[in-house]
Amino acid sequence: MAYRVNDKSDTDLLELLLDKGLEGLPEVLTQFINQAMEFERQRYLRAKPYERSEERTTYANGYKPKQLKSRVGKLHLQVPQTRDSKFYPSTLARGMRSERALKLAIAEMYFQGVSTRKVKHVMQELCGFEITSSEVSQAAKLLDKELEQWRKRSLGSYSYVYLDALYEKVRYGGIVRDCAVLMAVGIDQQGRREVLGLSVSLSEHEVHWREFLCQLQERGMHGVKLIISDAHAGLKAARKAVFPGIPWQRCHFHLQQNAQSYVTRQSKKREVGSVIRSILTAVDAQSAQALLSEAVKRYEKEMPNLATWMEENLSEGFSHFSFSEEHHRRIRTSNVVERLNKEVKRRTKIVGVFPSVDSCERLISAVLMERSDEWQTSVRYLTF
């Protein structure tokens, strides 16, 4: 029987839950998801059922049954279809990739014999049902194909590109290694953010960064006017080799952190932080350079190492002055990637130690793909 959005009212669903308790959760969740998918199809069609509308994009075309395993049990859903075959509910698509990747990572740990009773318990809590090694293998192949297509997709023109890395523990060659996850985020010509790619490698050495940047270039990334990152030696060398003519903005947040290691007196740390902040947030490059000269003279006797460091490094944070003042707050730090790193860490900490590089790349790719999709439909990050 085809499902209709008003088959059960909210009151009916509540009564069902009260009557059956937790046993009624699968049916309640099924009805709720079906309603959400139906509403989403109406928005896609730009017309309600049987409504005549000039804005209508296409027509409804029945429902396709789908069985979904969830944490509360099996859900027997009716997925709305359209005549143009282009509609698929984000209710099902959004959030599924990263959850599947997370389940697979934990399941893979279990089947490779490196898990504990606690890991097995977490896996069962996440999946809500028994899962076999063959199901893990099949699901991994399907998910990997989707994520690989996303990682290898063609790129376009991006005015600003942010680069950063985070570290995850991965079992490699029988031992646990700290693997670097290299990431790139771009701001396109419409001012929207997009995750351009990622790469899991054994370190942040120049060869790995250079290979990653060359891959972005080969996939069509062009039009870059400014690169924003920290001053990691491997990244710095690779950037100069692959993008020698593109200006570089050193992240202000990292500059502030680096400076503190040269402050010899604890009582001076806040003062130095304030001085550096006033330099980096000056109205223009000339004012910043003047303030920098004053600061160098101020500390050359009291803290000579700090004065030398400031003279050699702080000007690397001045590149943003050459661009629109409206963009300064967004392009003078790599905060957009730092926040992304926190989102990734929130998901990966559940796994702890990844059983393989593929498992690590799968979960992080899924998280980044979902966030990138959300960015493309959200408010613009910058206005050009």
Image: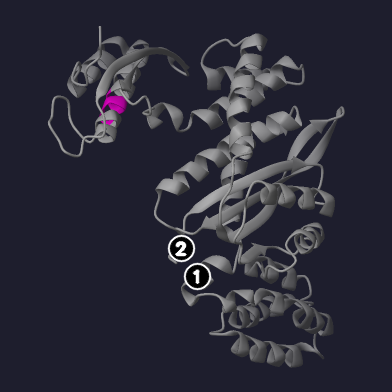
Say left or right for 245 vs 16.
Answer: right
Per the rendered image, the range of residues in magenta is: 35-39
**What residue did someone put label 2 on?**
382
Residue 343, by quadrant, is top right
Front one among 87 and 32: 87
Picture coordinates of residue 159, whole percent (x, y): 56, 62
At x 43%, y 65%, the residue is 383
Name the N-terminal-most of marks 2 and 1. Answer: 1
Q: Please give left or right for residue 82 compared with residue 6 in the image.
A: right
Could you say where residue 72 lies in the image, as x and y percent from the top left?
A: 44, 16
Q: Is residue 156 visible?
A: yes
Task: Please name the amino acid that badge 2 sits on.
Answer: Leu
| Residue annotated with mark 1 | 327
The quadrant the C terminus occupies is: bottom left
Foreground pick, 261 / 62: 62
In this rendering, the answer to whether 82 lies above or below 277 is above
